[in-house]
Amino acid sequence: MALDEFFEPEVAVAVVVTAAVTSPPVRKVLRRGLVYGLAGLLTAGDKITAAARGVAQKAQLVLDEARDGNGVAPAASMASSSAGIAPVASGSPQA
């Protein structure tokens, strides 16, 4: 190999990769970077999944409200939230 062949890009890349693979400190840095990178990807995936789940729940709530009368809660949920108190019509005496 002539001296000028050492300065070709392919040879330079091969030398850098070989030095990185055989160097324990460089391998440690690369391994740590891969671990942190993977942890970041997993965290981002969890955040995206949670956001999508929140959007789906909100969309379902909007659809339920539209189906039940434009934002009025359905009678079953009103009965459970009023704790057994019957509605009183206006003008009728209360017992």
Image (spheres, rainbow, N blue to C red):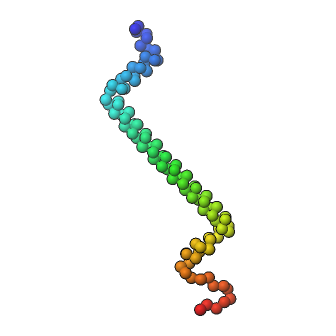
Residue at the spot 57% in from the left edge and 55% down from the top edge: 55
Viewed as shown, does residue 76 lie left or right of 28?
A: right
In percent of width and height, residue 52 lies at: 55, 52
> Closest to the observer: 2 or 87?
87
Q: Quadrant of residue 90?
A: bottom right
Residue 1: give x, y in percent of width and height: 40, 8
Q: Is residue 40 left or right of residue 58?
A: left
- Point out residue 13 in the picture as x, y percentages from the top left corner: 43, 21
Viewer-proximal residue among 10 and 3: 10
Quarter location, residue 95: bottom right
Left or right placement of residue 29 versus residue 52 in this view: left
Residue drawn 54% across the image and 54% down it: 53
Q: Residue furthest left?
A: 24
In the figure, 79 relative to 22: above or below? below
Return the x and y of residue 22 as percentages of the image width and height: 33, 25
Q: Nearer the viewer, residue 64 or 32?
A: 64
Looking at the image, is 40 positioned above or below residue 53? above
**In screen coordinates, is 20 left or right of 70?**
left
